[in-house]
Amino acid sequence: MTKKSKKYRKVLHILKGLEKHTTLTKHLLWLKKKYFLNIWYMHKIVFYKSAIKDLDEISSFIALDNPLQAKLVLRDIFNSIKYLENFPLLGKFRKEKLRELVVKHKYRVFYEVDKSLITVIAIFKHKNF
């Protein structure tokens, strides 16, 4: 068995484990099968203390009116950040290494990409930036 076929089987095993098959995922599956692209390299995500503080402030503010909505907003922000593990260049380029990812509920996530590490620097609401 060649190295390529071992990698291919491993990738297919990972892809079968995905719970949600969105249109994007189906398209990536097709690309992976046809061209055997190396697109599933996982990056590690690290949060600055200021980003964690921003998340805490966002959730506390929303929870004053609606605690359930606060959970949903945090879930959406984390799910969007989780996409960065596989697609680190997903966000818009700002300055030097700084990138910006726009999330549902009108939030912006600012992060840096460095080789295999993604550092989340800050999270703001559109109006506050």
Image: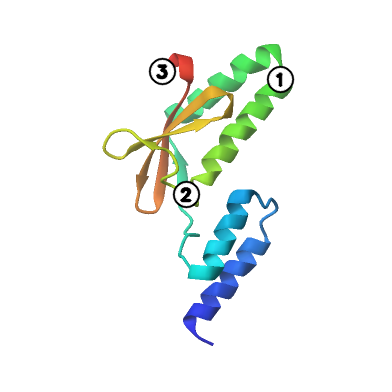
Horizontal arrangement in the rendering, residue 58 relative to residue 48 (left or right): right
Residue 86: x %, y % from top left: 50, 52
Seen at 60% across and 54% down, the residue is: 25
**74 vs 12: above or below:** above
Most extreme residue toward the bottom, as rendered? 1
Q: Secondary structure at mark 1?
A: helix
Q: Which mark is residue 129?
A: 3
Residues packed near mark 1 inside 10 Å, few (<14), some (14 to 19) or many (20 plus): few
Seen at 45% across and 43% down, the residue is: 90
Seen at 41% across and 18% down, the residue is: 129
- Mark 3–mark 1 Cα distance, whole angstroms, equals 24 Å
Mark positioned earlier in the residue sequence (2 or 1): 1
Q: Secondary structure at mark 2?
A: loop
Question: Callout 1, which amino acid?
Answer: Pro
Colouring method of the image: rainbow
Residue 53: x %, y % from top left: 49, 25
Question: Callout 3, which amino acid?
Answer: Phe
Mark nearest the camera among 3 and 1 is 3
Q: Secondary structure at mark 3?
A: loop
Residue 97: x %, y % from top left: 30, 40
- Mark 2–mark 3 Cα distance, whole angstroms, equals 24 Å
Question: Callout 2, which amino acid?
Answer: Phe
**68 vs 24: above or below:** above
Q: Residue 14, located in which quarter of the rendered image?
A: bottom right
Mark positioned earlier in the residue sequence (3 or 1): 1
Check if mark 2's residue and mark 3's residue have beta carbons within 8 Å.
no
Seen at 53% across and 65% down, the residue is: 32
- Give the residue number, with chain letter if any, for mark 2: 87
Q: Which mark is residue 67?
A: 1
Q: How many marks?
A: 3
